[in-house]
Image (cartoon, rainbow, N blue to C red):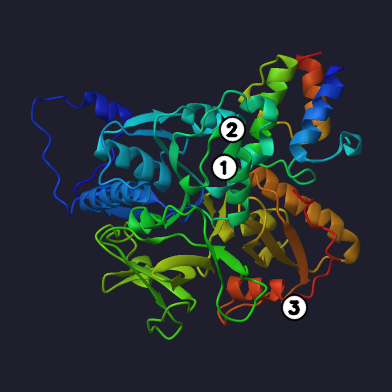
Amino acid sequence: MAAAALTEEQLADTPAGDAPLAAPRAQDLAFLQLTSGSTGTQRGVRITHGAVCANAAAIHDAIARAWGRDFLAESERVVSWLPLHHDMGLVGILLATIAGAFELTLMPPRAFLARPLTWLKALSGPTPVVSAAPNFAYHACVETLRDEDLAGLDLSGWHTALCGAEMVRPDTLARFAERFAPLGFDARALRPCYGLAEATLAVTFDVRDAGVRTAPVPGPARADVPREVACVGAPVRDTRVRIVGADGRELGEREVGRVHVAGPALFDGYWRDDAATAECLADGWLDTGDLGFLADGELHVTGREKDVLILRGHNVMPHELEWCAEEAGGGGGHARAGAFSVPGGPEGEVAVLAVETDAPPEQHAALTDAIRRAVADGLGLALHDLVLVRRGRLPKTTSGKVQRRELRRRYLAGELERLDDGTTMAPPR
Amino acid sequence: MTTRQETLETLARIAGVDAATLAPEQHLVVDLGIDSPKALRLLVELEDRLDVEIEDEDAAGLKTVGDVLAYVARVGG
């Protein structure tokens, strides 16, 4: 392992030296990407120099193809507020920009979140420009900007507006395109994409230059799957995608299954966690834990089987929410809570928490209030729904672990016996 | 418009509710759905409209509508 952690003091004591840095080999570790969560069980995704180079080149290639160019020139301009500790900001913006020696305008995430207009102002002008953001950012622009804010903006140079890092909502992007068309924004600039830290970043990218396209989800209608999803494009250069059924066999076109990815940008394992690595990486294929289907070679993501909630482009592990419920006294000594997400809201998914309780009915209101406040104060999140059930009613494995996927299915099918009457739903946003 | 009215209007607009429905005991996140990105917009708008500067440490203590009203009354009076 060619990596070491240094404190600032140690770094200050390190002689600068004249020795040139050794050129890294492709298989050397470039960085560890922490995948999720603010606490405890974070996983370090091992990304090699070879993977970074492969993915940066694939991103350049995809942007150029989408834009109808043979290659990107050094004069390309990139604008971003994405956090640089996040894979989309680190790889998609910072490293890909360095690799291409493009011009980069960076602003702190806070600047965008506080004033979405800052982002559009930085993009404004006739010079070609690339930018990327999760779905919620496009929603925030539509929701918060007033007409008088927009005077003088020119979005005609923005030829690549990538949308990824969370579920892509076609309705959000359609509203964005409509709202900003008078400022010169071209709807074809909106390019949904799909990726994950375990593949360095980019896996698929819509290069058709046809605007956001949707496809109906094959199979019978299900409460836990949207009817129609956005096309997130074809695999980027040198990357392959296949869809695998529950029996491990590869599925055909328009059949929903697990999304698997192979290619030169895959991670080479989780940091000091061989068991977790073995769960998702085998024979050169990464099991993403996401569900989707291929149509005409292009990927459509329909949902997720792994236990993670993606809220505002930020990964939240279910146990973070469940612990808040425990701390608020919901589960007592043997806290049993299950968290999952369902489609909805501007971010594409919203959080639901189900908690077992023995408390008498007259205490339920105080209990739900305490849990909601614990989640709000601990994670800054508003729960979409908080469901109280009688002790023992959450589906569990034989070893007593809450089965979150089965819980989610029952919730959406209306099969959960809730103790409350459902009036604890969050106010509509 | 008074500071209090101005604050209520801003809160209402960011939460997407009618200002008349706001009550001091309402929790910003739980009752009004003001999650962290919205909270940031709220602070910046209050700073702009009331010409005050809200320190991060102070902002972290603002949990309810009443907290916000009391705070702006103190700093922006």
Q: Please state the horizontal and vertical placement of residue A237, each as a whole percent of the image.
A: 28, 58
- Name which residue type carries label 2: Pro
Q: Chain of mark 3?
A: A
SS label for mark 2 = helix
SS label for mark 3 = loop
A77 w.r.t. A159: above or below: above
Residue drawn at the location 11% of the way across and 25% of the way down: A17
Q: Report the label total.
A: 3
- Name which residue type carries label 1: Ala
Label 2 crowd bin: few (<14), some (14–19), many (20+), radius 10 Å: many
SS label for mark 1 = helix
Residue drawn at the location 70% of the way across and 72% of the way down: A412
Task: Say the numbered circle drawn on residue A137.
Answer: 1
* Residue on which disc 2 sits: A116
Q: Is residue B8 visible?
A: yes
Q: Please state the horizontal and vertical placement of residue A269, each as a whole percent of the image.
A: 30, 61
Q: Quadrant of residue A202?
A: bottom left
Label 2 vs label 3: CA separation? 41 Å
Residue drawn at the location 41% of the way across and 75% of the way down: A243
Task: Say the numbered circle drawn on residue A415.
Answer: 3
Q: Please state the horizontal and vertical placement of residue A168, each as a whole percent of the image.
A: 54, 55
Tell me if label 1 and label 2 are in contact, CB under 8 Å.
Answer: yes
Observer-nearest of A279 and A151: A151
